[in-house]
Amino acid sequence: MKILPVILSGGSGSRLWPLSREQYPKQLISFNSEGSLLQETVLRLDGLSADLAAPMLVCNENHRFLVAEQLLEIDHEASAILLEPVGRNTAPALTIAAMYRLQEDGDAILLVMPADHVVRLTGPFHAAINEAVTLAESGALVTFGIVPTHGETGFGYIRKGKPLDGQRNAAEIAEFVEKPDKQTADDYVASGDYLWNSGMFVMKASVWLKQIETYQPAMAAACRKALQDKVQDLDFCRLDRTAFEACPSESIDYAVMEKLGDDGRSDGGPQGIVVPLDAGWSDLGAWPAIWEVCERDECGNMIKGDVLTHDTRNTLIHAEHRLVASVGLDDLLVVETADAVLVANKSHAQDVKKIVEQLKLDGRSESLVHRRVYRPWGSYEGIDAGDRFQVKRIVVKPGAALSLQMHHHRAEHWIVVKGTARVTCGDETFLLSENQSTYIPIGEKHRLENPGTVVLEIIEVQSGSYLGEDDIVRFEDQYGRSD
């Protein structure tokens, strides 16, 4: 039976703000390697098994082009990319993936992984997967429990039950435990009976759906309706918004795993099984986890970017756009981006999400996007803005094109600084080379294209009474975007 990786890429990573934003979350970012967390999740499966299918991804519809582009960068294809119109936690995401697989290609062993984990040791990881696959083939629902290195209060725990006969590591799941206080976490680790809850699972698609029908019939019905009314959008499967919004929001643990009994396996064994995993795992849930997994200097500092330190210890300093200097710091987090700077004590790192919540309440864009915003055709970045004007740097990939559009409230001046642009303005279409420019009047239909083989860069100067991104009327778009 085929092993189908199901990669869940729907999170926003608010505790890793300001690097992680809602429209460019942590799974799309590189922290400790050349590739992003999503790319590393896909690549660590290489060589696992001859029966390994191309991965299926479940992601937010706003990330679809970013996800597809990152797969292309590592020369991997997805068997499907399923788009969630809203977040509904991990159980509905897995249910949709299982239903889609059964409809398209029949049953499979689902290897369920979040896209934002780090696993340093591929060999032990593959060995644990192979053990879990063997158990799943007989009807078990298997999760991986991380062998703890310390008493961690930021993770849930799994208490191991009776060891399985004939298995080297696996055990029955005795219970799932919520995030404990520090003393309780230390006691768990000292007992040797508890593992960190990894959020990774292995089971047959058919077995998962049977449990969902049993324990979460409303979820099963909503997911079935969302998939039944899906729309194929280029290479993406877009779920029906109304049906999926009606779906209950539950994690895989709450929805099914904590409710499992001892029946249902073909060999008579227990359904809920945990396989210990000791492979250098981290879920990178907050900035201290980044500090722990990345290389540190002799003073315990994790430094990235243009940074100077003096008398600084056990501190994470991440600089993206300018020089950051530190003096006399200990156990802090300093993260600099183009439009925001975070300074926090590591012991309060979980509360970074409170800042994101406040930004959202205030209607500020820093919770959603970076100064550089990515689009399927490339990116744009704000350079300067003032009363009735705005300056942007626009980058268009070779062969890409912006939509044919118009604006009600602004005019635009374009200056080509690199490459060649094909410009449509009203009934005219013409080419611009480096150092040439053109003017787009208010209300005129226009389009910018890159017909060349090198990246096109232009400086755009907008002027008018309103300069918001929602002042766009699209007439044609090769990426299927609507107004």
Image: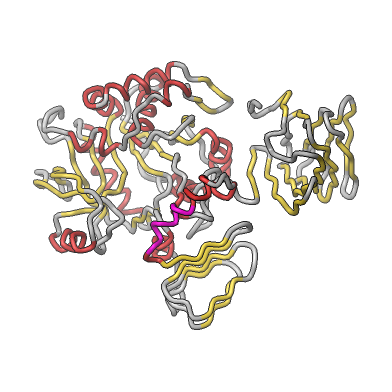
Determine whether, in the image, residue 35 is placed left or right of residue 258.
right
Badge count: 0
Q: Quadrant of the N terminus?
A: top left
**Residue 282, how many percent across, how many down?**
36, 56
Q: Nearer the viewer, residue 269 or 160?
A: 160
**Residue 196, how many percent across, how many down?**
25, 53
Q: Quadrant of the C terminus?
A: top right
Q: Nearer the viewer, residue 137 or 91?
A: 91
**Residue 427, how many percent across, how many down?**
89, 24
Q: Is residue 23 magenta?
A: no
Determine whether, in the image, residue 199 is placed left or right of residue 442.
left
Q: Nearer the viewer, residue 359 or 113?
A: 359
Magenta segment boundaries in residue numbering: 348-355
How is colour applied across the structure in the image? secondary structure
Residue 182 visible (yes or no): yes
Q: Quadrant location of residue 257? A: top left
Residue beneath the point at 75% across and 49% down: 393
299 up-or-down from 242: above or below: below
Determine whether, in the image, residue 172 is placed left or right of residue 124.
left
Q: Main secondary structure of the magenta part?
A: helix
Q: Is residue 350 magenta?
A: yes
Residue 458 visible (yes or no): no
Determine whether, in the image, residue 435 is placed left or right of residue 178.
right
Residue beneath the point at 77% across and 47% down: 390
Residue beneath the point at 29% across and 36% down: 252
**Residue 409, how many percent across, how many down?**
79, 34
Residue beneath the point at 14% across and 46% down: 171
Q: Quadrant location of residue 221? A: top left
